[in-house]
Image: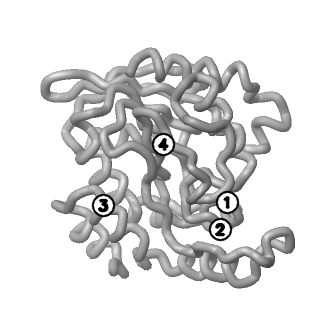
Amino acid sequence: MARTAAQVRRLAVGVPLAELDARVSVCGACPRLVRWREDVAVIKRASYAAEPYWGRPIAGWGSETPAVLVVGLAPAAHGANRTGRVFTGDRSGDWLFASLHRVGLATRATSVHAADGLELIDTRMVAAVRCAPPQNKPTTAERDTCAPWIEAELALLEPHLRVVVALGSIGWDAALRSFRSLGWTLPRPRPRFGHGAEAQLIGPDRSITLLGSYHPSQQNTFTGRLTEPMLDAVLSRAAALR
């Protein structure tokens, strides 16, 4: 189990994807996040009082050889922190999976729990930070401590990827930092996040397209900043590029 940033970096390297997922799921390197995720799992939300909570870090989920990678911020306290599967069981996930289904990247339009039968098609999902943070705001130190997990996962997935969809500016920045850490070349000037933004990440023998989308948070969907057609447009582009 990783209990320090140095241990995270050491344990994230040189293992297959299934072992990486297992190591992520027992990480304890960020004390504030450990306390929060576990407290939430004990106190629970009233509407989920009868349900068991996962209360641990959230590994990536989906295809092991994806053409499309979706990068989000962090698990929701009563979403993935409850269900144990990224983007599952919260309003953001409801929007995201419905859109993925509409564009042909998911077998079902709803995601309720980790054993609901939903499958992703040529697609995988990861979070930049693997533990639910208070107020959905990890600190810079927590983000940096967690970074080796997504970097290691990208190193394993990169041979298959054709497109990365970044949800929100934090997902965008995490994708850029991670590919740079793997030795990929980023455009200059550094690509700026925006809904529908596109950038080409240049590897040794090919490129990967990075797409930006507003995060399907309630703050964005309730205010109309992100609409279903807007999200569908980005994910349709990803599906076409795969």
Look at mark 2 in the image and give the residue it sits on.
82
Look at mark 1 in the image and give the residue it sits on.
79
* CB-based contact (under 8 Å), mark 2 and mark 1: yes
Q: Which mark is residue 71?
A: 4
The residues bearing labels 2 and 1 have C-alpha atoms spaced at a distance of 5 Å
Name the amino acid, label 2. Answer: Arg
In this rendering, position of residue 173 left or right of residue 226: left
Label 3 vs 1, first from the N-terminus: 3
Depicted 168 relative to depicted 58: above or below: above
Quarter of the image containing the C terminus? top left
Look at mark 3 in the image and give the residue it sits on.
18
Which residue is rendered at x = 24% and y = 25% of the image? 202
In this rendering, position of residue 103 left or right of residue 71: right
* CB-based contact (under 8 Å), mark 4 and mark 1: no
- Estimate how packed mark 2 is, as few (under 14), some (14 to 19) or many (20 or more) residues with alpha carbons within 10 Å: many
Which residue is rendered at x = 43% and y = 42% of the image? 124
Q: Position of residue 118 (x, y in %)?
A: 57, 46
* CB-based contact (under 8 Å), mark 3 and mark 4: no
Label 4 vs 1, first from the N-terminus: 4
The residues bearing labels 4 and 2 have C-alpha atoms spaced at a distance of 19 Å
Quarter of the image containing the N terminus? bottom left
Mark 3 vs mark 4: in front: 3
The residues bearing labels 2 and 3 have C-alpha atoms spaced at a distance of 21 Å
* CB-based contact (under 8 Å), mark 4 and mark 2: no
